[in-house]
């Protein structure tokens, strides 16, 4: 009896392994397939159900079709606005702008004003002040809203706005904003705010997608004349104890605000089936920044964020600075950084010295030695948890938004980025980057290579899970 049971278990184990070898590589990227096959190979009875649950980044067909329809509408409604189109005639921008437009549907526009908000509390104060000044509508789309002083302040501002007759809509990620939804959704709905959870789980998961696919965007649009996009959530800076956040947010005005409204309207339509009317913002600002929106996520046919980041790195001729809290790149991104550095480009990577994701921190350390060897400079910012996400190329292109330099942001999360083709914006971000570097530990290649063997092993094991993070 014992022998029969053991034999049956052995047969089942090997059938699972063989089935995984046949099934997984055809449905995931090679890097992800290696991680899953390793897990299934070691623990078949655990690995198979985990893969079926989390292995393939699938969205429901309904969501993919709605995103495609939303993108078609965005392209169609931009056609009469040709006077707002910004057309670069040469240089790197002439290559980037068509790529981003084909991926995310948004054309580059001129006549925008961009104010960079680097102070955590001041950024939230500006948002609340703009909500208090709203006359028509407030649209907020955020990954995380916490049940703390900031969540309370945002809730109170929305309630004040609806009391004035302002139409308020709030989209929150069902997982990231779970505490905020539980604490504030009943009160907000009672006040007249329209609240929806994005990518809900539970019994609704089949209408959403894989359970760990999330909407990671941070977007606010007020009266279709003021917009916010960046890395900051609706929470206190210390919502993760011991890790006070430092962020970067862009407050924008001009035609690009209508595009942010288009992103909100697309997500609203995907979640509710309701199509919102988006009025184009025809106001041209005196600052005259050329800007373009980059939406990305699993509902798109390509990995928009990854392709844009890699193209920006490849197009750099003198200097590229990349700031991210989570750095777990795929092979294409790692190759882009290596090629740029070996070609003589000054490549600076700015990471956080502290990290609220231990496994991610170990995995990202596994890349340091290879990057340092080819000339990439790595700085670890000390004073805060550096949650800001931005990239500058030479002196004329910058990307600010919610995009981390990891496989999760590239393939699994819905993200948003603002690309600015403007020397003034780049100069202002470079000043912020200089402050990071002045308060950072700079990783020395020789010292790093002398780290203990147990640390190397820990990093290597963590890296094997890069596609699962």
Image (cartoon, rainbow, N blue to C red):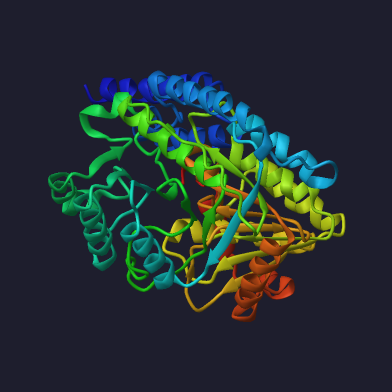
Q: Quadrant of residue 105?
A: top right
Quadrant placement of the N terminus:
top left
Q: Is residue 252 left or right of residue 142?
A: right
Residue under the image location 33 percent in, 31 percent down: 271
Q: Quadrant of residue 426?
A: bottom right
Residue 9 horizontal/vertical position (percent): 32, 25
Task: Work out whether 301 lies above or below 402.
Answer: above
Residue under the image location 79 percent in, 41 percent down: 94
Q: Nearer the viewer, residue 26 or 339?
A: 339
Q: Nearer the viewer, residue 237 or 397?
A: 397
The tally of labels here is 0
Task: Work out whether 320 lies above or below 60.
Answer: below
Residue under the image location 70 percent in, 67 percent down: 427
Does residue 160 show up? yes
Residue 416 horizontal/vertical position (percent): 52, 45
Task: Work out whether 169 lies above or below 203.
Answer: below
Residue under the image location 47 percent in, 50 percent down: 225
Does residue 464 show up? no
Q: Quadrant of residue 287?
A: bottom right
Q: Is residue 138 left or right of residue 309?
A: left
Task: Work out whether 19 lies above or below 441.
Answer: above
Residue 81 horizontal/vertical position (percent): 62, 33
Residue 195 horizontal/vertical position (percent): 25, 42
């Amino acid at each position: 009896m014992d022998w029969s049971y053991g034999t049956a278990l052995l047969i089942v184990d090997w059938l699972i392994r063989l089935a995984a070898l046949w099934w997984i590589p055809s449905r995931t990227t090679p890097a992800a397939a290696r991680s899953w096959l390793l897990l299934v190979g070691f623990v078949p009875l655990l690995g198979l159900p985990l893969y079926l649950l989390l292995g393939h980044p699938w969205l429901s067909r309904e969501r993919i079709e709605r995103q495609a329809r939303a993108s078609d509408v965005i392209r169609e409604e931009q056609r009469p606005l040709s006077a707002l189109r910004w057309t670069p005639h040469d240089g790197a921008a002439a290559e980037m702008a068509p790529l981003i437009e084909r991926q995310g549907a948004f054309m580059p526009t001129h006549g925008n004003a961009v104010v960079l908000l680097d102070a955590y509390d001041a950024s939230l104060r500006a948002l609340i002040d703009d909500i208090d000044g709203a006359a028509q509508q407030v649209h907020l789309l955020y990954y995380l809203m916490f049940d703390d002083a900031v969540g309370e302040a945002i809730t109170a501002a929305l309630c004040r706005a609806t009391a004035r007759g302002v139409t308020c809509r709030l989209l929150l990620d069902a997982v990231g904003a779970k505490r905020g939804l539980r604490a504030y959704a009943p009160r907000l709905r009672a006040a007249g705010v329209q609240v929806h959870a994005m990518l809900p789980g539970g019994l609704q998961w089949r209408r959403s997608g894989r359970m760990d696919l999330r909407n990671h965007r941070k977007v606010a649009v007020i009266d279709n004349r003021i917009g916010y996009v960046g890395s900051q959530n609706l929470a206190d800076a210390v919502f993760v104890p011991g890790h006070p956040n430092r962020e970067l947010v862009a407050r924008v005005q001009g035609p690009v605000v209508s595009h942010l409204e288009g992103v909100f309207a697309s997500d609203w339509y995907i979640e509710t089936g309701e199509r919102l009317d988006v009025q184009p913002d025809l106001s041209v600002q005196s600052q005259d920044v050329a800007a373009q929106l980059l939406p990305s996520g699993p509902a798109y046919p390509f990995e928009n964020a990854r392709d844009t980041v890699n193209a920006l790195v490849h197009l750099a001729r003198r200097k590229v600075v990349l700031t991210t809290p989570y750095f777990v790149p795929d092979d294409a991104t790692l190759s882009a950084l290596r090629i740029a550095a070996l070609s003589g480009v000054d490549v600076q990577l700015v990471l956080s010295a502290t990290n609220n994701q231990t496994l991610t921190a170990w995995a990202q350390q596994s890349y340091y030695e290879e990057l340092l060897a080819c000339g990439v400079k790595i700085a670890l910012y000390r004073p805060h948890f550096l949650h800001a996400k931005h990239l500058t190329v030479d002196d004329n292109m910058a990307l600010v938004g919610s995009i981390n330099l990891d496989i999760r942001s590239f393939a699994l999360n819905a993200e948003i980025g603002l690309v600015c083709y403007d020397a003034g914006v780049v100069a202002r971000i470079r000043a912020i980057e200089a402050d990071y570097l002045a308060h950072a530990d700079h990783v020395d290649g020789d010292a790093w290579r002398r780290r203990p063997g147990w640390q190397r092993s820990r990093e290597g094991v963590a890296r094997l899970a890069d596609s699962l993070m």
